[in-house]
Image: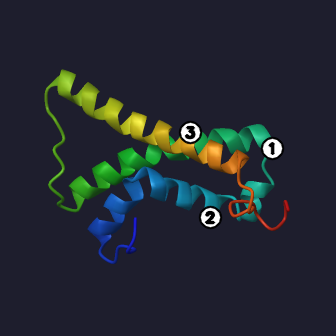
Amino acid sequence: MFPFPTEPLEFLVWLGAPASAGVIVSLLLERAGWFQALASEAKARLVFITFLVLPFASALGGAVLGAEVAIPTDPQAIARWALALALQGLTAWGASQYAHGSDPLKVFKSKDTV
């Protein structure tokens, strides 16, 4: 995750990593006023969807920018590829939920909720 990427392609690869997905969601969404105004259930849905979308956006964005992303062509390989990206997002989401619930230093809490 470190050092922070400086090239667009490096940023997309970084963005698709589970740890950076947590950073994006925790530091950007949870500090946004519009996000805090949402109901608790709506926040949970948006966070879950964001974690699922980031790996796909990173892989497809990298392919558009010319990265050597091996997007498979046969249906079974496509299913495995999509499952791997979805599992990456689910893993990041699960880790974020654990970190969010057990954050003794209140690192991931917004200033409004402390």
What is the spatial separation of the Cα atoms under label 2 and label 3, in whole angstroms? 17 Å
Answer above or below: position of 16 versus 65. above
Residue placed under numbered mark 3 in the picture: 94
Q: Secondary structure at mark 1?
A: loop
Q: Secondary structure at mark 2?
A: helix
Q: Nearer the viewer, residue 35 or 83?
A: 83
Residue placed under numbered mark 1 in the picture: 39
Q: Give the amino acid type for the residue marked by disc 1 in the picture.
A: Ala
Q: Residue 27 bears which disc, if any?
A: 2
- At x 30%, y 49%, the residue is 59
Pointer 3 or 1: first along the chain? 1
Task: Indicate the quadrant where residue 37 lies.
Answer: bottom right
Q: Which quadrant does the N terminus fall into?
A: bottom left
Answer above or below: position of 79 versus 98. above
Q: Nearer the viewer, mark 2 or mark 1?
A: 2
Q: Are marks 3 and 1 in contact (CB under 8 Å)?
A: no
Q: Nearer the viewer, residue 28 or 63?
A: 28
What is the spatial separation of the Cα atoms under label 3 and label 1, in whole angstroms? 20 Å
Q: Give the amino acid type for the residue marked by disc 3 in the picture.
A: Gly
Mark 2: few/some/many CA within 10 Å (<14, 14-19, 20+): some
Q: Secondary structure at mark 3?
A: helix
- At x 40%, y 40%, the residue is 88
Q: What percent of the width, then of the height, locates residue 78?
A: 23, 29
Q: What percent of the width, then of the height, locates residue 62?
A: 26, 57
Q: Are marks 2 and 1 in contact (CB under 8 Å)?
A: no
Pointer 2 or 1: first along the chain? 2
